[in-house]
Image (cartoon, rainbow, N blue to C red):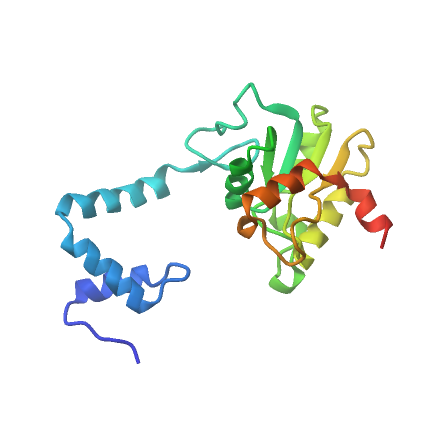
């Protein structure tokens, strides 16, 4: 049974916080009461930061990572290896891999994985823009750094087939130090870093099956 509040403003705030992933109504209430105990400036900065985030954040036109500019800092960094592109599911995976300091190339954020059960097909994620980046002729290696799940494997294979017309491009996959069923963001940095360094040809991953 949901708790009722005397204040409609409190009820509305709790309801909004409770929509966040992993936040129940009890936790939402604690967060709202915490903000109420703070100086008004604290709550104002908090609210304004969320509003600015939603209004001003954009996606890099090259790799689809979040950015405050048209091209993200990674893509515009001249010291990055532009011949290597690491393909990830989401922005959190970019952060996880960057924390390992083992990847010095660029990224491509798909924005999801192929999942017929959820109604997500290849047309719903950024695969065609990846193919176009490869077709432009500057990419020499595509690293498939997707989660070791059924959806991740399905997406890996689909991308592999789509890039088949470009035989000069090496397609690699993370070494299976990342356990089957694991998502990239929950893999520790040491294991993830080693998986990047010890990546193997994608074709070898199913040639042995």
Q: Is residue 128 visible in the rendered structure shown here? A: no
Q: Could you tell me which residue is drawn at 51 percent across and 37 percent down?
A: 99
Which quadrant of the figure has residue 85? top right
Residue 39 placement, left or right of 2: left
Q: Is residue 168 visible in the rendered structure shown here? A: yes
Q: Position of residue 171 (x, y in %)?
A: 75, 37
Q: Position of residue 81 (x, y in %)?
A: 63, 24
Q: Give the answer, above or below, for where 97 lies relative to 82.
A: below
Which quadrant of the figure has residue 75? top right
Residue 206 placement, left or right of 37: right
* Viewer-side residue, 168 vs 188: 188
Q: Quadrant of the C terminus?
A: bottom right
* Viewer-side residue, 159 vs 107: 107
* Viewer-side residue, 172 vs 132: 172
Which quadrant of the figure has residue 79? top right
Q: Could you tell me which residue is drawn at 15 percent across and 50 percent down?
A: 38
Q: Quadrant of the N terminus?
A: bottom left
Residue 164 placement, left or right of 134: right
Q: Position of residue 29 (x, y in %)?
A: 25, 64
């Amino acid at each position: 049974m949901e708790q009722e509040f005397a204040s409609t403003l409190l009820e509305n705030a709790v309801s909004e916080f409770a929509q966040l992933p992993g936040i129940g109504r009890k936790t939402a209430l604690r967060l709202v009461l915490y903000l109420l105990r703070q100086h008004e400036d604290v709550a104002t900065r908090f609210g304004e930061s969320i509003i600015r985030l939603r209004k001003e954040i954009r996606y890099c036109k090259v790799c689809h990572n979040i950015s405050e500019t048209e091209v993200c800092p990674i893509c515009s960094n001249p010291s990055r290896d532009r011949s290597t592109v690491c393909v990830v599911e989401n922005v959190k995976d970019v952060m996880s891999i960057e924390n390992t300091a083992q990847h010095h190339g660029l990224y491509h954020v798909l924005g999801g994985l192929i999942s017929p059960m959820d109604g997500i097909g290849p047309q719903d994620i950024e695969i065609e823009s990846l193919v176009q980046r490869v077709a432009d002729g500057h990419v020499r290696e595509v690293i498939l750094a997707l989660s070791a799940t059924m959806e991740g494997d399905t997406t890996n294979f689909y991308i592999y087939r789509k890039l088949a017309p470009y035989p000069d491009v090496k397609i690699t996959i993370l070494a299976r130090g990342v356990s089957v069923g694991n998502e990239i963001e929950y893999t520790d940095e040491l294991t993830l870093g080693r998986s990047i360094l010890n990546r193997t040809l994608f074709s070898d991953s199913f040639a042995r099956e």
